[in-house]
Image: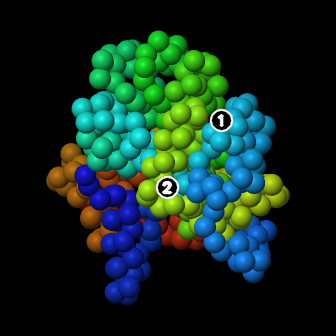
Amino acid sequence: MEASVTISITARAAELRRQGSDVITMSAGEPDMDTPDNIKEAGIRAIRDGKTKYTAPASGLIELKEAICEKLEKENQLSYESSQIVVTCGAKQVIFDAIASLINPGDEAILPAPFYVSYADQVKLMGGIPRIVQTDPAHNFNLTADQLTAVLSPRSKLIIFNSPCNPTGATYSADRWRELARILTDTAVHVITDEIYEKFIYNGGTHASIAVQDENLRARTLVVNGFSKAYAMTGWRVGYGAGPQEWMTHIAKVQSQETTNTCTMSQHAAVEALKGPQGSIQAMRNIFQKRREVIVDRFDRLDGVTCPKPDGAFYVFPDVSDLLDRSGLEDDVALCAYLLDEAGVAAVPGTGFGTPGYVRFSYTLPDDRLEEAISRVEQAVEKLG
C-alpha cells in the first residue's frame, strides 16, 4: 500500500511554502471558494446549542439521513430508506468501509483507469487484487462493454466507477451505463459508483448513474456522494453511501469499530447544505467552466502536450508522453518534481491514478493565481526544449 500521492505532493508543497517558496498548488482536489455562510452558521449553531456529543446512531443523524434520501429521490430517481444510508468522514471512508466489508484475500476488483488514487490501495489493504483496465481517451476514458467482458472472471467481486471522474473529468452517458449494466446484471459483481462530482458537469450536461439502469444490479450497488466538493466543505469531512440493506449494515459495522460517528456538528451543517439555498453550486460551476476553457486552451498549445477537455469535475489530465520523450525526463513523476522545483507549481503524476504519461492539474485557484500557474508551467515546459 502506497501513501496517497495527492496528499504527499500537497504536503511537500506546503513545506516549501513554509520555507518561503511561492508555490502554487494545483494538486489538491478542493474548491477555492469558502463554505457558504448558511452552512457555516448551522455548524456554529450546533456547537452553541450543545450538539457536541456522539451521534446516535453512529451511522448518521436521522435528520441527515432523511435529507439524503429526499435528495436521492428528487435528483437521482433513487429510492432508499434511512436505514440504507451511512454517513461517513468523507466519501473516501464509505468507499473504504465498503471494500473492507466485501473484499476477501484473492478477490478481484475491476478498476477502470485512470482511477482515483485511493481505490487500488484500499483493495490491496484487504488482500484483494486490483484488475486495472486502461481506458482510451478516444472513448472519453469510458470502460467499454468489450473491455468489461474481457476482464470479468470467477474471482471478480467488485467494480468501482467514478463519474465525473477524478482525474479526467470524463462522464458516462446513460447509454454507456445501460451497456455495462446489462453485462453486470448477470454476474455476482458488486458495484461502487462514486458520484462526488455530480454537481460539476459543464455545457448543460446532466449527471447519469449506473444505479438507475437495472433494478437487479442496484441490489448490489453502492452510491457514494458527499459534501466536500459541491458545498466547498472538504475540511468538514462528511460523505455518505446509499445501497442495499445487507451491505449497508456491514458498512455501518465497520465504521462503528473504526471512527464511531462522523463529526456531529459537521452533520448538522450538512443538513443545512441539503435543505438550504443551492445557488452557490451554480455559481461555482460557472466559475469552474470558465477556468476550464482557459487552462485547456493554454495547455493544449504546449509542445508535446495534448489536453482533452473534461466534461466535469475541476481537473485537466493532459497527455505528456510526447513531452517526456523529447525532454529526457524519466517519467511523469519526474516531470511533476521538475515543475515543483523549477516552476513552483504542484501537480499530480498520472502514475498515481494508474495511468503513466499523464499529469493532473486542478484548476481550483483564484483567476489571478491560475493565470500565474499556467504561465509558470508554460515557461518550465519551454525550458525543456
Helix, strand or loop status at disc 1: loop
Q: Which residue is mark 2?
A: 256
**Which of the 4 quarters of the picture holds residue 110?**
top left
Residue 226 drawn at (x, y percent): 60, 51
Q: Residue at x 42, y 30 (%)?
A: 159
Q: Which mark is residue 333?
A: none
| Residue 88 spot, x, y in % from top left | 55, 55
Q: Secondary structure at mark 2?
A: helix
Amino acid at circle 2: Ser
Which residue bears the numbered disc 1? 207
In front of the other: 279 or 53? 53
Q: Quadrant of the C terminus?
A: bottom left
Q: Residue at x 40, y 30 (%)?
A: 158
Callout 1 crowding tier (Cα within 10 Å): few <14, some 14–19, many ≥20: many
The residue lying toward the viewer, choosing from 247 and 362, is: 247
Viewer-nearest of discs 1 and 2: 2
Q: CA distance from mark 1 to mark 2?
A: 32 Å
* Image location (x, y in percent) of residue 220: 52, 27
Q: Is residue 200 above or below residue 379?
A: above
Which amino acid does the dot numbered 1 rest on?
Answer: His
Is residue 364 at all visible to an observer of this figure? no
- Categorize mark 2 by other alpha carbons within 10 Å: few (<14), some (14-19), many (20+): some
Nearest to N terminus: mark 1 or mark 2: 1
